Amino acid sequence: MTAVANELKPILVFDSGIGGLTVLREARVLMPERGFIYVADDAGFPYGGWEEQALKDRIVDLFGKLLAEHDPEVCIIACNTAFTLVGADLRAAFPQMTFIGTVPAIKPAAERTRSGLVSVLATPGTVKRAYTRDLIQSFATQCHVRLVGSENLARLAEAYIRGDAVSDEAVLAEIDQCFVEKDGRKTDIVVLACTHYPFMANIFRRLAPWPVDWLDPAEAIARRARSLVPQAVDAVHPDNFDFAMFTSGAPDFPTRRLMQGFGLRA
Ligand code: DGL
């Protein structure tokens, strides 16, 4: 039987702000038949500096409402800061739902590095998570991993994407800790462990003191989601379905314009 497109449940993509759009854009390529709901907890942005228990409670509570309201097929938590903290709690609180997470791509970086020097650029929250330390312990003990917790980069990425001017000095001050030289070797991979950062990858490349691979996990997350979402042969994307929700209830004009650019109704 041919599946009818609008009978398919949508995919919910979640982030604290606009960073999850970097994952949404890959997910859409692989799941063109699905509708997408993009949820930005902009009232809680940035997540990087939150106290852990308060952030956990906030996100679990929010998902209680989102799942009841939208009944998605799966949820993609397109936020390292959120998933490394609350992924296990979400799965425990909503066992009937599939959550696809985003975690720092430390394992692929450790497999690919030639110099053995890898840096992880993330929010201060992600850098201090036990989850992140465990990833290093499990997959990268043979490497020298430098964790760089950036206070301002998620905010700068939001400003940049909205069209505000962002100075090279401000960006360089956030990324320069990623570049390590040790015994004649140099960092060759920087993991983009915040979904906001790929939006600025071109600036990073231009400002980098030497060329490195900037590892963006968006495509891998989308592939994982595709593998968990049932294929619907012959289904086509429901017209005009995709939309974005903001917990503030009041995204500003540049943000609404950005959403429109991504084909999302705000
Ligand atoms: N985009 C989020 C992440 O992947 C974090 C941005 C923030 O809220 O600080 O970690």
Image: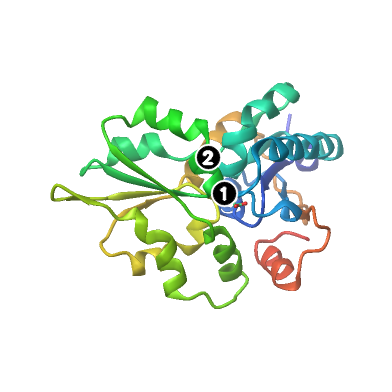
Question: Dot 1: within a 10 Å radius of its alpha carbon, few (fewer than 14), some, or many (20 or more) residues?
Answer: many
Q: Is residue 94 visible?
A: no
**Could you tell me which residue is drawn at 74 percent across and 41 percent down?**
10
Asked whether, in this view, residue 34 is left or right of residue 199, the answer is right
State which quadrant residue 64 falls in: top right
Q: Residue furthest front?
A: 51
Q: Which mark is residue 45?
A: none
User: Does the Cβ of the disc 2 residue fall within 8 Å of ligand 1?
Assistant: no
Residue 60 x %, y %: 75, 34
Rendered position, 127 above or below 154? above
Please give the residue where the numbered disc 2 appears in the rendered image: 221
Asked whether, in this view, residue 211 is left or right of residue 44, the answer is left
Name the kind of residue labelled 2 in the image.
Answer: Ile
Please give the residue where the numbered disc 1 appears in the rendered image: 23
Query: Which residue is nearer to you in this view: 245 or 146?
Result: 146
Residue 133 x %, y %: 44, 32
State which quadrant residue 111 falls in: top left
Contact (CB < 8 A) between labels 2 and 1? yes
Callout 2 secondary element: helix
Asked whether, in this view, residue 184 is left or right of residue 161, the answer is left
**Could you tell me which residue is drawn at 47 percent across and 44 percent down?**
217
**Could you tell me which residue is drawn at 69 percent across and 29 percent down?**
90
Residue 99 x %, y %: 65, 31
Mark sitting earlier along the chain (2/1):
1
Quarter of the image containing the C terminus?
bottom right
Name the kind of residue labelled 1 in the image.
Answer: Val
Q: Is residue 140 visible?
A: yes
**Could you tell me which residue is drawn at 71 percent across and 42 percent down?**
12
Q: Residue furthest bottom?
A: 165
Q: CA distance from mark 2 to mark 1?
A: 7 Å
Quarter of the image containing the N terminus?
top right
Rendered position, 22 above or below 223? below
